[in-house]
């Protein structure tokens, strides 16, 4: 396994593969597979170990091309490569929301994965199926948690909050008390407020948990301009500069986790990958925190976790499709998913792994999170089809404007509704 960053290296990879096939002259050809992926946490560091059993079993090798952590940046780059029918990349690691937008560029894996499909949660397979083609195989699913500092809640006499309003009060009270004791770096709540896909996830959770819908509903109706959604976003705006640092408006997952692991936050919204790392040897919060479902809000009594997750797709332009499909099946299968669960606290998409004692022991969040992800709220990527990225970017921009203090939530959502109606232009396509 090697790492590379440059397109020159990509070209030489392809040449090396071609040379290997040529030299083998029809005998067993060993190929070098190029896998492109963004990553957070320790995913890049673990990748070599993850693919080693497949490399040993097949004699092929895998080169990882790491991308920026932001799913929005990855999407932009992948779309360019795929539109150019770039054959240098065999496998793409794809976000759960991308299937309808990128489907035409990927190989249908229905037949190749026939034995594996029944082992996965049907809803996740469904999310990667576009017009009857299974365009990507799930490698892990995602649903965020409210991370809380159990030691600080106990010290200051607070319970784990079950509403956003309680969270706001508790975060402020503990932040004030800790600062009064000289802990000047402490913040109440950290989350992902940068203008990117992660803000769509955070804001969908606020809005949905306040009873304000899902931006665009499953039937394609634009629902975002409503008082519950506005109240949710106004509450979030009140956090900026009070219980959350101003810098939260530029935070993605890793910035939040970095601050959390220094011990300077009472609450954090993040995905399960931050659980194992938070309990790592280099973490100041090791053993000090717990996880709970995200709070509810307003008069509503059900919380909402955005459904995330990652998949692997085989490029139609790959010259090594057979080996690429074999690697995709391996990464989506039980052995690799178990390793990922234990080493990266990623939630498996294989049903049986939720009863695996090794996983439960290494990462107790995983069996606890089965129901959370099964009830998680999808972003409107299915109803908005190829327009999803624009819908999401209009939404995160509208929310970011409110969080930055440039406008009110009701004014911003009214404009957003009009822009979304224009984009929809009668029907999503
Ligand atoms: C996580 C989720 C992914 C989401 C991203 C947003 O990686 O798994 O679905 O789009 O966060 O930042």
Image (spheres, grey):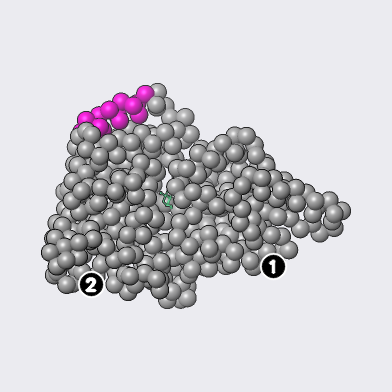
Q: Are marks 1 and 2 in contact (CB under 8 Å)?
A: no
Residue 413 highlighted magenta (yes or no): yes
Between residue 63 and residue 301, name the one nearer to us: 63
Name the residue: 60% across, 38% down: 82
Front label number (1 vs 2): 2
Q: Which residue is mark 2?
A: 151
**Magenta segment:** 409-422
Q: Is disc 1 surrounded by few (<14), some (14 to 19) or many (20+) residues within 10 Å?
A: few
Name the residue: 74% across, 55% down: 31
Q: Position of residue 392 (x, y in %)?
A: 38, 38
Q: Position of residue 309 (x, y in %)?
A: 45, 53
Compute the Cα span from label 1 to label 2: 45 Å
Q: Is disc 2 surrounded by few (<14), some (14 to 19) or many (20+) residues within 10 Å?
A: some
Q: Position of residue 255 (x, y in %)?
A: 36, 54
User: What numbered label is drawn on residue 56?
Assistant: 1
Secondary structure state at the residue bearing disc 1: helix
Q: Is residue 113 visible to the viewer in this orientation of the structure?
A: no
Left or right position of 275 against 147: right
Quadrant of the frame with the N terminus: bottom right
């Amino acid at each position: 396994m090697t790492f590379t960053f440059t397109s020159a290296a990509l070209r030489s990879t392809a040449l090396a593969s071609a040379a290997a096939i040529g030299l083998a002259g029809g005998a067993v050809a060993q190929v070098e597979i190029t896998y492109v992926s963004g990553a957070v946490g320790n995913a890049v560091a673990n990748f070599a170990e993850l693919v080693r059993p497949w490399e040993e079993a097949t004699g092929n090798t895998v080169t990882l091309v790491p991308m920026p952590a932001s799913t929005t940046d990855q999407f932009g780059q992948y779309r360019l490569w795929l539109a150019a029918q770039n054959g240098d990349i065999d496998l793409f690691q794809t976000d759960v929301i991308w299937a309808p937008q990128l489907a035409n560029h990927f190989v249908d894996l229905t037949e190749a994965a026939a034995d594996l499909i029944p082992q996965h949660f049907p809803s996740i397979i469904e999310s990667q199926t576009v017009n009857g083609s299974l365009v990507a195989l799930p490698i892990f699913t995602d649903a965020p948690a409210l991370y809380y500092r159990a030691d600080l809640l106990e010290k200051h006499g607070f319970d784990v909050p079950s509403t956003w309003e309680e969270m706001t009060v508790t975060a402020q009270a503990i932040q004030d008390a800790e600062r009064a004791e000289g802990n000047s770096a402490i913040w109440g709540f950290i989350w992902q407020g940068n203008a990117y896909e992660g803000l769509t996830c955070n804001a969908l959770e606020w809005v949905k948990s306040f009873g304000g819908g899902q931006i665009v509903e499953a039937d394609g109706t634009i629902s975002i301009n409503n008082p519950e959604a506005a109240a949710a976003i106004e509450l979030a705006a009140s956090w900026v500069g009070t219980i959350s640092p101003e810098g939260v408006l530029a935070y993605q997952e890793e910035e939040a986790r970095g601050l959390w692991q220094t011990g300077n936050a009472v609450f954090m919204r993040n995905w399960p990958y931050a659980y194992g790392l938070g309990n790592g040897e280099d973490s100041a919060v090791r053993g000090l925190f717990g996880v709970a479902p995200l709070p509810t809000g307003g008069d509503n009594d059900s919380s909402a976790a955005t459904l995330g997750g990652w998949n692997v797709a085989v490029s139609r332009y790959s010259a090594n499709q057979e080996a690429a499909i074999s690697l995709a099946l391996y990464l989506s299968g039980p052995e690799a998913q178990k390793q990922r669960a234990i080493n990266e606290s990623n939630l498996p998409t294989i049903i049986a792994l939720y009863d695996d004692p090794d996983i439960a022991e290494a990462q107790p969040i995983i069996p606890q999170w089965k129901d959370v992800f099964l009830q998680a709220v999808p972003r409107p990527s299915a109803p908005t089809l190829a327009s999803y990225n624009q819908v999401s970017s209009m939404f995160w921009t509208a929310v970011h404007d409110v969080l930055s203090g440039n406008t009110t939530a009701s004014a911003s959502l009214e404009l957003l509704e009009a822009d979304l109606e224009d984009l929809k232009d009668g029907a999503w396509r």
